[in-house]
Amino acid sequence: QVQLVESGGGLVQAGGSLRLSCAASGSISSIYAMGWYRQVPGKQRELVAVALGGGITNYADSVKGRFTISRDNSKNMVYLQMNSLNPEDTAVYLCNADYGNGVWRYWGQGTQVTVSS
């Protein structure tokens, strides 16, 4: 079992940038997918970006070209660089570890991102 702790959220003006970090308590090198999701009250949790072990990344259409996910297996860290933020990006951002076996999926507590117009 891996524990995940997010940081880097905050309040930013539209057009600004933030970098989120996710620190894992153990090695992430064998984890199939490390991802970032976001949650808005009253809405379904949605996938923002995912980084697979082989270097493949996928993004939600709404963030393509603005957000970049990266994983550093040597440091057990995952990052989400968010540029050109807009108010629609306001949400709690959660880090996820998926071992790819259909059973082991772990979540962090989340970090709040608020974008003001």
Image: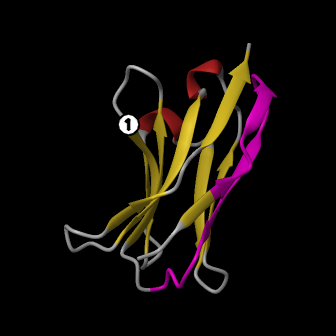
Q: Quadrant of residue 56?
A: bottom left
**How packed is label 1: few (under 14 Cα within 10 Å), some, or many (20 or more)?**
some
Q: The C terminus is located in which quarter? A: top right
Amino acid, disc 1: Arg
Q: Residue at x 64, y 19 (%)?
A: 87
**At which x and y percent is residue 75?**
67, 81
Q: How has the structure been colored for display?
A: secondary structure
- Relative to the observer, which residue lies in front, 21 or 60? 21
Residue 27 drawn above or below residue 86:
below
- Relative to the observer, which residue lies in front, 61 or 72? 72
- Relative to the observer, which residue lies in front, 84 or 96? 96
Read off the magenta span: 6-29
Q: Quadrant of residue 26?
A: bottom right
Residue 76 drawn above or below residue 46:
below
Residue 9 drawn in magenta? yes
**At which x and y percent is residue 107?**
44, 57
**At which x and y percent is residue 55?**
47, 74
Instruction: Give the labeled residue for mark 1.
Output: 45
Residue at the top extreme, as displayed: 117
Q: Residue at x 42, y 41 (%)?
A: 60
**At which x and y percent is residue 105?**
33, 64
Residue 25 drawn in magenta? yes
Mark 1: secondary structure:
loop
